[in-house]
Image (cartoon, rainbow, N blue to C red):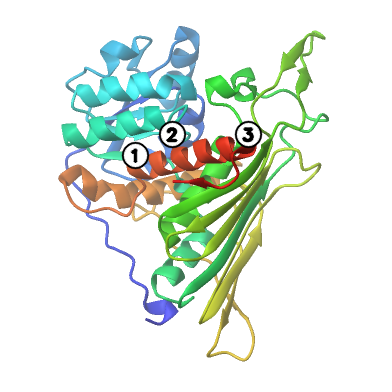
Amino acid sequence: MPIRDVPIREVPIREVPIRVGLIGVGWGSVVQTPAFRMAPPFEVAALCSRREESVRAAGQNLGIDDVSTDWRAFVQRDDLDVISICTPVDLHHEQAMAAIAAGKHVLVEKPVGLDARQTGEMLAAAEQAGVAHAVCFEGRWEPSRLKIWEMVRAGHLGQPYMAMARSGGDFWHPTRGLQSEWMYKRDQGGGYLMGMGSHDLDYVCAMFGEPEAVCADVRTTVTERARPDGSVVDVDADDTSLLLMRMQNGMIVSVITTAVAFQRNFRAFEAYGSEGSLTMDGLLMGGEAVEVISGSITQDHALVVPSSDRKPASGIEPPKRRAAGAIVSLALMLEDWLPALSGQPTIAPTLADGHRVARIVDAARRSSDGAGWVTL
């Protein structure tokens, strides 16, 4: 199929609003709420957070009067169709399981859970309850990545041989200030393999299928961070990782992630196959479309292919902020998830995809601890 003929599925728009209750008002306020607003008939109807001052401030900023601090009662509400979970990772399992038990469709921020045991339980519960479920791997819908995904599905690579994904920034470099302290704790779901590398792991698996085995080095390079008051945060979550994966289709994939790349901000991808190649090199959360370089056995040399120009069907523009690219990507993902709420097929990532990433991360950690190649 020629590149320009790759179909984009038409998005069905329901007239009845799909009422969303959002738990967690950090990323939920900055990215999720504007993304839902760009993807009708989703409608963020209510907010919930542990801190009353935070949820009230978020509600006032977003124009949402319905706010709560009791998430257990929140997920039981009859007037909410979808529960979106944007809380710290160590809360995801309990909150998702409660929402599923209440019969709610669920959207869960990544990382989905602390480990594959938790994510497996969440997936099994959702499947048994018959609710729609999705995970925020919206990176698939970044313009350059969406174009590559479409071209791979169209057979541009032929038989895929290998792929490489890498992403990085200087978020944990000693010259940068502290992030939220839970991010430095492995038992609270911190670390950049889960927090950032998970997007790359999901992306390569979405295109190339299931991994067969994993070999990895997962490291905590900077083991202490100073607080403004001079006290120290002990760090045991990872800031740098290198994974090799043998895929069931016979190819090999590498995924490199780092949060200590001084004055750097990057996200890059390369894939090579029997009939072609695809590469892109851009900024992490850069917000701008990145050119895709396409090689083909039918061409004398590589060509520049414009990134996807797909926009949300609503025509609603995102807020003008640094996270605008993530907002648009998530809005597109929500459009593609919408059929699932009516029991139809979807290409949006589900808890099954989140569980697969958790299994890879668990295997990578075992490998790094000395197990060598770990079979999945």
User: In the image shown, does 12 or 115 lie closer to the viewer?
Assistant: 115
Which of these two is toward me, 277 or 24? 277
Classify 100 as above or below 134.
Answer: above
Residue corresponding to mark 3: 369
Name the amino acid, label 1: Leu
| x 43%, y 34%: residue | 109
> Dot 1 surroundings within 10 Å: few (below 14), some, or many (20 or more)?
many
Does 185 appear above or below 231? Answer: below
Q: Which residue is mark 1?
A: 351
Q: Which mark is residue 109?
A: 2
Categorize mark 3 by other alpha carbons within 10 Å: few (<14), some (14-19), many (20+): few
Q: Nearer the viewer, residue 126 or 148?
A: 126
Gap in Å between the C-alphas at discs 2 and 1? 10 Å
Amino acid, disc 2: Glu
Residue 44 appears in the picture as rendered: no
* Residue 52 versus residue 202 in the image, above or below: above
Location of residue 105 in the rendering, given as x and y in whole percent from the top left corner: 24, 33
Front-most of 150 and 255? 255
